[in-house]
Structures are given as structure tokens and as C-alpha cells.
Image (cartoon, rainbow, N blue to C red):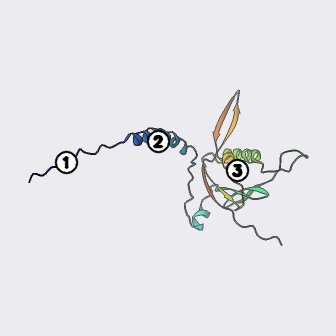
């Protein structure tokens, strides 16, 4: 008896929908990948040192403590340099009280003039510190704009910033 065999043709893949997806997806992913690097700020954590090593050096170890009621600028070893209280609202309808970032920037410029080779600083914040305040403190510490003749020049202050938790205050007696 004679067997009849069916001729099978190979299956044809329909990939048009897949190609359309790739054509749309690849440019979208490439265009959004550019913006992810702009939002990243590289921060360096301070190296751990023993207390004996810290006492041997006479260098400045600048730290700014962001508190609810003030900015405390100090040296980790030498103590408090200056306390910048929050600015009160001048009159009804004026902007709400906040940290005095201009005064902080001016103080950072004075400190940088005394220690021109220093680039490291620490920002210590209380747990309930607003993110915007923390960013503005870091911006005031990293660089400033100064006028030289008719030109405005951006000067680098303390670009290597470490972030940490503020020490707890001693309870008031």
C-alpha cells in the first residue's frame, strides 16, 4: 500500500510587531539614559581615623551641623567657629523664616581664604532636616560666585563633602 505524505512547509515567523516595539523602545531608553547621570552627586565618606591621629594634625576638619534652629559651623577638633541662627520673617507677608545660606557662603569663603589647600568638609544633619536645606547647605559649601572687575567668577570652596548624622544635643538643664 502506498503512503501519502503531507508536504509540510516551515513555519513563517511574524516578527513585525517585535521590530516595531524595538524601534520605539531603543530611542526611548537611549534618551532617558542621558539624564540619569545629571542627578548623581559623588560623595566621599571620611576615612576612619583614631582619635590620636586626629589630635596630631593641626589642620582644619570643617563640619557644618544643620540643626532645626541654626547652622553650626565648626572644626571637629577645635570646636565651634560660628553659629548662624535661622532668619526670622521680617514682616507679615514676607517669606517664611529659614536658614541663612548667604551668611554660610560668606563664612565658607573666609574659611577657604585661611585654608586654601583644604577641600574636604562634612555636613551633619538632624533626622528631620528638609532635603532642600541639606542641598542648599552643600551648594553653599561647594562653590561661590565672586565678582572680579566686570566678570563673575565661580570659585571652588570645599567640593569633597561627606554627609552624616548630627550629634545629639545635650539636654538643657
Question: Which residue position holds label 3?
Answer: 132
| Front one among 32 and 65 | 32
**For the point 75% across and 59% down, which residue is it?**
67
Res 105 → quadrant: top right
Q: Find residue 168 and report its horizontal and vertical position in percent.
A: 72, 67
Q: Which residue is mark 2?
A: 25
Which comes before the other along the chain, label 3 or label 1?
1
Do the CB atoms of the residues marked 2 and 3 lie less than 8 Å apart? no
Foreground mark, 2 or 3? 2
Image mark for residue 6: 1
Q: Position of residue 51 (x, y in %)?
A: 60, 67
Vertical order, 151 against 11 (above or below): above
Measure how far apart labels 2 and 3 are at the Cα level.
Answer: 34 Å
The one nearer the camera, 96 or 69, is: 96
Residue farthest bottom in this picture: 173
Mark in the foreground, 1 or 2: 1
Q: Are marks 1 and 2 in contact (CB under 8 Å)?
A: no
Q: Mark 3, mark 1: which one is toward the viewer? A: 1
| Labels 3 & 1 near each other (Cβ < 8 A) | no
Q: Is residue 116 left or right of residue 20?
A: right
* Mark 2 crowdedness (10 Å alpha carbons): few <14, some 14-19, many ≥20: few
What's the CA distance linking mark 3 and mark 1?
Answer: 74 Å
- Characterize the local packing of mark 3: few (<14), some (14-19) or many (20 or more) Cα atoms within 10 angstroms: few
**Secondary element at image label 3:** helix
Q: Earlier in the sequence, mark 2 or mark 3?
A: 2
User: In the image, is 168 to the left or to the right of 10?
Assistant: right
50 in relation to 149, above or below? below
Amino acid at each position: 500500500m502506498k503512503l501519502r505524505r503531507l508536504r509540510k512547509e516551515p513555519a513563517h515567523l511574524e516578527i513585525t510587531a517585535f521590530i516595531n516595539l524595538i524601534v520605539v523602545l531603543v530611542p526611548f531608553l537611549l534618551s532617558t539614559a542621558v539624564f540619569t547621570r545629571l542627578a548623581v552627586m559623588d560623595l566621599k565618606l571620611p576615612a576612619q581615623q583614631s582619635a590620636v591621629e586626629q589630635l596630631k594634625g593641626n589642620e582644619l576638619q570643617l563640619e557644618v551641623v544643620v540643626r532645626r534652629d541654626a547652622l553650626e559651623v565648626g572644626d571637629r577638633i577645635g570646636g565651634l567657629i560660628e553659629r548662624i541662627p535661622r532668619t526670622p520673617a521680617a514682616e507679615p507677608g514676607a517669606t517664611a523664616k529659614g536658614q541663612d545660606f548667604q551668611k554660610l557662603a560668606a563664612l565658607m569663603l573666609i574659611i577657604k581664604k585661611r585654608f586654601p589647600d583644604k577641600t574636604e568638609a562634612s555636613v551633619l544633619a538632624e533626622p528631620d532636616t528638609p532635603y532642600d536645606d541639606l542641598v542648599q547647605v552643600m551648594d553653599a559649601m561647594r562653590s561661590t560666585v565672586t565678582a572680579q572687575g566686570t566678570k563673575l567668577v565661580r570659585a571652588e570652596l570645599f567640593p569633597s563633602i561627606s554627609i552624616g548624622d548630627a550629634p545629639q544635643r545635650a539636654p538643657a538643664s
